[in-house]
Structures are given as structure tokens and as C-alpha cells.
Image (cartoon, grey):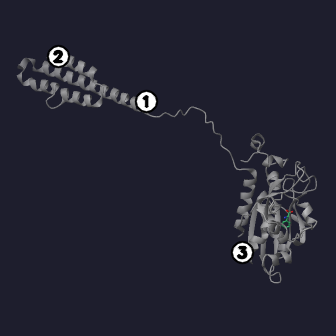
Amino acid sequence: MLEKILKEFDLDYLACQDKTAYNDLRVKYLGKSGKVTDALKEIKNVPNENKKAYGESVNNLKVLIEKRLGELSEKLEAMEFEKLMADMERVDLTVPNAESVGSLHPITITQNKIVEIFKSMGFAVEDGNEVETDYNNFEAVNIPKNHPARDMQDTFYLENGQVLKTHTSASQNRIMRKYGAPLKAIFPGRCFRNEELDASHENTFFQLEGMMIDKDISISNLIYFMKTMLSQVFGKEVNVRLRPGFFPFVEPGFELDCSCPYCGGEGCSVCKKSGWIELCPCGMIHPRVLEMGGIDPEEYQGFAFGLGLSRLAMMNFEINDIRVLNGGKLKQLKQIKTK
Ligand code: PHE
């Protein structure tokens, strides 16, 4: 009889293909009135002398069936998982990722760094237009029509008389009108000039302008802020020096040089052996410029500077041709170590 149970179980086992059939199978043999359970109960009808042998046989059968059911359950689970995987949309994680990851542009990295420094010194950060009125770009910074200073900043003129801004100073007037005095603001921006292109001249470049206007502002404030900012940019204490420079919108006007952070002033290829780097035209804001911005020059003074952002980025990342910055040639840009 036990053999018959085992044979039947073998057939059922082979036919079982899913979890429901498996549960039925288990009940059929090991359930309360399952075949094995019944066989166990049957022991009471077995003559005494055979009870031991019978008991052992049924028990062995039970252990065997339990073992086979365990195996079957594992097999069914594996089958179900495989089916699930087969039905699922597959992503092959071993295929190389075709999209390469980019990085911020050297100009952006340099700009972000300077913006953070000035923010920490309480300066507002403003944006400027790229297309400007003739008034903002020239007149409002004391460069009237036919002034020779316009020659230095030849640009691209639109048919409506507007211009592509030649310097970030084009935003000075709008910012003075927006904030009034006192004010502390910086405004980075893209500038354009009609230039003969070479390794240090581009038709499109970046500046970062700053203005500070308050009562009792003097050249020493200008020197302090420039020295602090440049020391932070280069990560070491640098010295600055002022040479006279002419810009119609500042009086007095200067070219600010920074002691070469690479050689410490000894003279190297970056500073062309002079120990100094020309970095930042600046000066005390011309009273007429303040006036045009709606600020009383009798009461307020201020300084302004126009940092050459492209220049600084080139120094920072050891780029020796400005055309690389906007050239859009990935091969060249990728060689810049921005990390
Ligand atoms: N706007 C001037 C230039 O582009 C630089 C400058 C800015 C000079 C502010 C003085 C003060 O040449």
C-alpha cells in the first residue's frame, strides 16, 4: 500500500507546475486526511508484531515525501522568478555608458568663486544685459558721442541703435538707479568688441564689475577689497599696486596690478618676468557718473573695478589662448583640468 502511495506521489510530482498545484499536492499527502496521514492512522489496524516495521515504513515515506515537497517548492519558486525576469523590461548594466559627464566651464568656475567671495563681503550680485542702449554702454559712463574712448571699444551695432555691450560698466547706471546709495554690488557679464582675434583677444569675453558707493569711500577701500579678493582667489596673500590709467568714468583711474601668485614676485613666464600681473582696471567713480545714476556726488563717493574674468580663468587653468574658451572645440576644452 505504501508503495502505491509513493508511485502516485511520483506521478503527481511530475505533473505539478505551479504553486496552487503544489499546495493541493501537499494537502493530498500530508494534510489532515491526506494519504500519508491516513496511512499513519492505519497503524491501529496493523497486528501488534508488525506495528514497529509498519510504523517505520510510514515514517520513512513521510520523511521522503516531505523532502521531495521541499525540493519541489524551491524548484517552483526558481521557475516563477525566471518567468518574472523574462517578462520584465531588461536593462543591460554591462553595456558601457555612452553619455560622458561634462563639467562646468572654466569661466563659470572662476566666476562662481569670485561671486562667493564678494557675497561674503556683503555685495549684491546682479546680472546685466548683453544688448545695451548706447546710453548705458557709453553716455552714462561719461563716453559721449565722438569721444575717442569709443574707438577703443568698437563693437557690434544693431540697426535700432543698440549695441552689444563692450564692458560690464554698461550696467553701472541701471544698478545705481536700482539701489541708490549706499550700494555694494558686483555684476559679471559677457562682453563683446570688434577685435582682431589673436591668443589674447576675442570678440566675446567675460568681465566682472564691482561698485561700492557710500560716504567717505576712498582709494584705500578700493585697495583693501581688491587685495582681499585676489588673495582669496589665489589662495595666498598677494600684494597689489596701482598705476595711473585712463577711463572716462573714473577719476582718478588706475590699472591695478597683482603680485604674481605663481612666482611670488620673482618673475616667471606667467608675469612675463615682471613679478606683477595687470588684472583689474579700476578707480574712483567720476562725479558725473554718480550724478547720471541719480546719486549726489557731494554726499557720496565710490569705487568701481572691471575685473577681466576671462583673463583670470586663463591664469587659473593655465590656458594660453583665449580663443579656446569660446571656441566650442571640445577636444581643446577637455584638456583643461577643471577638477
Ligand atoms: N570698463 C572698463 C573696461 O572694460 C574697465 C573699468 C571698470 C575701469 C571699472 C574702471 C572702472 O576697459
Q: Which secondary structure lies at badge 3?
A: helix
From this view, report whether residue 319 is shown above or below residue 99. below
**Of all residues shown, which one is farthest toward the bottom?**
298
> Could you say whether the residue bearing mark 1 is in a helix, strand or loop?
helix
Label 2 or label 1, whichever lies nearer to me, is 1
Number of the label disc, if any, that sits on residue 4: 2
Q: Amino acid at mark 1?
A: Ala
Instruction: Give the CA separation, mark 3 to mark 1.
Output: 65 Å
The amino acid type of the residue labelled 2 equals Lys
- Picture coordinates of residue 31 (x, y %)? 18, 31
Task: Give the quadrant of ligand 1.
Answer: bottom right
Graded by Cα atoms within 10 Å as few (under 14), some (14 to 19) or many (20 or more), the crowding at tag 1 reads few
246 to 313, vertically: above or below:
below
Q: Which three-letter amino acid code belongs to the residue tagged 3?
A: Tyr
Q: Secondary structure at mark 2?
A: helix
Disc 3 crowd rating (10 Å Cα; few below 14, some 14-19, many 20+) is few
**Which mark lies nearer to you, 2 or 3?**
3
Tell me where residue 132 appears, x and y as whole percent: 78, 64
Residue at image position (83%, 55%) is: 311
- Where does the image place residue 97, in percent across and percent down from the top left? 61, 36
Location of mark 1 (residue): 86
Q: Residue 295: horizontal and vertical position, in percent?
A: 78, 79
Considering only order in the chain, which callout, 1 or 3, is on the residue closer to the N terminus?
Answer: 1
Q: Nearer the viewer, residue 239 or 182?
A: 182
Q: Earlier in the sequence, mark 2 or mark 1?
A: 2
Q: Which residue is mark 3?
A: 179
The mark total stands at 3
The residues bearing labels 2 and 3 have C-alpha atoms spaced at a distance of 100 Å
**Residue 149, quarter of the rendered image:** bottom right
